[in-house]
Amino acid sequence: MKNSTKSKRQTENEALISLKLNSKNIVEIELAPTLSKIRKSHLLYINKNIQDLGGGKKLPACIHFTGFMMLSKSAIKYRSTEEYARYRLANAFLVDSFSKAVIYNFYLEADTSSVPVASFKEQKKAFDWLETFMVAA
């Protein structure tokens, strides 16, 4: 029974979250517009894929999304753990409007994530910011 649950969760995650490693060695994460609440299981799925894409190295991640998203309580707690940070250098949230960038940056000031995080409206600025962590690593 447990295997079928895992299988179902895996399928759900694949439908909501896609990841790729771009030519700059930045993991690009696309979140479906229908995903309105990030759960710990989503973060575990993302971390496993980042680990696989980087061969165990820490990588920067650019998270693309268009809607407003909330984090579950378990996801918030998980983001402050060493396990969450194991394969991440930094996270850049790429949002679809300047107002969302302002709102997310305000929210991120109080963020308890164990990795640096910021939001951007322009992909180039997000990538430039993420590349600063690659030089330091």
Image: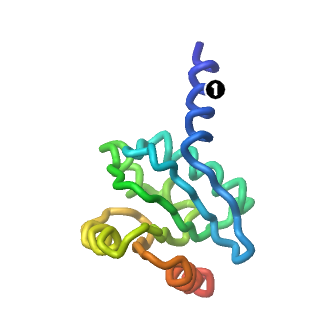
Give the camera-side residue of 78 and 46. Answer: 46
Residue 41 shown left or right of residue 11 in the figure: left
Between 82 and 15, the one lying in front of the other is: 15
Asked if 4 appears above or below 38 in the picture, the reply is above
Q: Residue furthest top?
A: 1
Measuring from the top left, give residue 107's x and y in whole percent.
Answer: 26, 66
In the picture, which quadrant includes the N terminus?
Answer: top right
Q: Which residue is mark 1?
A: 7
Whether residue 14 is situated above or below residue 33 in the rendered picture: above
**Left-right relation of 15 to 121:** right
Furthest residue toward front = 97
The quarter of the displayed image where residue 16 is located: top right
Residue 56: x %, y % from top left: 69, 60
Q: Is residue 109 visible?
A: no
Residue type, label 1:
Ser
At which x and y percent is residue 55? 74, 60
Query: Number of labelled discs?
Result: 1
55 displayed left or right of 40: right
For the C terminus, the quadrant is bottom right
Residue 114 seen by the camera = yes
Instruction: Please tell me which residue lies in front, 78 or 50.
Output: 50
Q: Secondary structure at mark 1?
A: helix
Residue drawn at 69 percent across, 73 percent down = 25
User: Mark 1 Cα within 10 Å, few/some/many (few <14, many 20+)?
Assistant: few
Colour treatment of the image: rainbow
* Residue at screen point 49% across, 55% down: 84
Q: Nearer the viewer, residue 73 or 84?
A: 73
**Left or right position of 56 against 71:** right
**Above or below 71: residue 128:** below
Residue 47 image point, x, y percent: 57, 52
